[in-house]
Amino acid sequence: MADLNKTLDLKRQAGFGTVAIICLIILYAPILVLMIFSFNSGSQITKFEGLGLSWYAAAFENQEFYSATKNTLIISFTATIFSTIAAVLAAIGTTRVKPWPGMSWAFMIINLPLMVPEIITAVATLSFFALIAGAFGLNFGIGNIIIAHTVFCIPFAYMPIKARLEDMDLTLENAAADLYASPWQAFKRITLPLLMPGIASGTALAFIVSFDDFTITQLVAGPGQTTLPLFIWNQIRRPMTPEINAISTILLMVSILFISVSFIISKSRKS
Amino acid sequence: MSNSKVAVDVRGASRVFKAPGQEPVAALDNVSVSIKENEFFTLLGPSGCGKTTLLRLIAGFDFPTDGQIMLYGEDIAVLPPYKRPVNTVFQSYALFPHMTVAQNIGFGLEMQGNPKLEIDARVAEMLKLVRMEPMKDRKTSQISGGQQQRVALARALAPKPKVLLLDEPLSALDYKLRKDMQIELKRLQTETGITFIFVTHDQEEALTMSDRIAVMSKGKILQVGSPHDIYDRPAVRFVADFIGETNFLSGAVKSSVKGTSKVKLDCGPEIAASADDGMKSSGKVTVVIRPEHSNLCAVKQGQMKGVLENAVYFGTDTHYHVKLDDGTHFMVRQQNEGGSGQNGFKVGAPVGISIDEGTARILRD
């Protein structure tokens, strides 16, 4: 049996290894090159002159980088919190209720931001805020970006939370009700703690999506509302130095950190 | 059962499932049954017979489309589960994976709002009752299936429910453990004095533990009685067939005197068979004879005659498959004696079958 399994194993098919390696190179070589050049002591992003941390030092001294980071964190954290709350409520509303007419429509509407081209959402959001500003004279400043991000992040937070709710054994909630827990107590003591890994992945995903969003932010952001992705974009239009590589690497590390944390949480909770 | 107070009284309960564009399906069809206080009552039947539906109606996970569920005289049919003083042991145990054994057992007491000291004392008492004291701080994933089973029992018993509902709780255990748990369950029921309603498809489990059994099929209760009643005096063909192994012989009633009829069997002989009061005393009937109530013997001494087709050795006993003169198959079960265990009957040879006096019964249908 063991031998048979080996021959059926896809890994042992001819060419599998080669294809896998080519894919990995195409995916990661550019990122690797970007990271290597962030340690360049020279001032070009295409010619490596020696190892050094000078561009990291330059980045940390750059005031614009600081203000962009601050904006990004304010926007990402706020949008993540609101979108996760909305996603938890939406997930419960689409899994823990009797099927109601229009439920599939609700499901579609929640996930629509995933399917609509982002540039369309961006243009629509821009004209929406312009309309509000024109009609009511309302402008929430950085709040505009937070609202736009919140809406856009909901489906990303919604998906892992809904998956977790669907996987959860309904008998556990029955058991809680059987043991005199009111619906709210059962939710607080049983459903919510068991849902935490799903919420953690949802939160991490929403954060990442908001953290590196460019298209919507670019259109909605007003003066002084530069976020990190916008900051990098602006840098590229100037003569490029490895400082941009250093900043990109920092951004990448933050993303990797969040993804890893959410991965570890969901792993440890499952076992 | 000297105490005859009724704990649960199900009155004409139905549960009809309706799906658009489909015929409505009655999972439970106008069922009435009274379960007495302190009773070990079993709902027995094949899957899809409605036994679990009935249990869910009593627990409050589902609601009857018609009828009443009375608990000590109060109609609880529309109460949500958390307002019913009944607890359930689930087939999958449904232990809370993020809590310890002790926290699981204390959950119901905590939800009832008992003071912490009282909860701790009761949890300790329960841990002792199910012999799980050394495991109290373990997570439920760190204990074996049999131990999980005991924790599930302790958790359901801790709030002192008026009735304990058990939904096939032993089906996930292996044979040896299941045997032990059957004895354990009976002990717990006797010690706590709580009414148990037990759902199973395993007839042996039902016969060994129950005070009374309700046999169900297709959403209806066919017969309610003690294990003896159900096994020795099955009322209908389904009950006789589902519980144990049995032989069905058709025949015609010749005469009837005070519960005993003379029946001329289609395979030849005329035998005496008992019947409940009010059963028909003439015409075509079906007679049941348990395999262990019949014996192989020499052709001359037998009440019935046939050819021995097969003998299957089971260790404690042997099953003899006999083809009777009219072509019906009849099974005889005989306890093995020591030695060769051949009992002298050869496959392919003609044999006689004698029936123990007073064991043949006429079915109601």
Image (cartoon, rainbow, N blue to C red):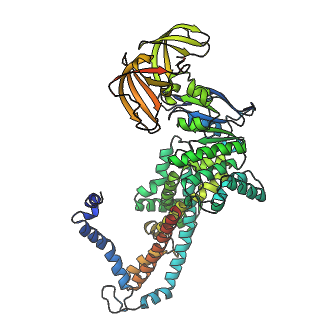
Q: Is residue B344 left or right of residue A176?
A: left
The vertical placement of A116 against B349, above or below, is below
In-front residue for pair B53/B127 = B127
Q: Is residue A214 visible in this depiction of the protein?
A: yes
The vertical placement of B321 against B149, above or below, is above
Q: Is residue B254 left or right of residue A22?
A: right
**Residue lying furthest front in this view?**
B339
Residue B107 percent across, percent down from the top left: 68, 54
Q: Residue B189 occupies which quadrant of the picture?
A: top right
In-front residue for pair A144/B87 = B87
Residue A77 percent across, percent down from the top left: 56, 69
Quadrant where the N terminus of chain B sits is top right
Q: Going 49% across and 27% down the picture, which residue do you hit?
A: B241
In-front residue for pair A231/B47 = B47
The vertical placement of A245 against A193, above or below, is below
Residue B207 percent across, percent down from the top left: 58, 35
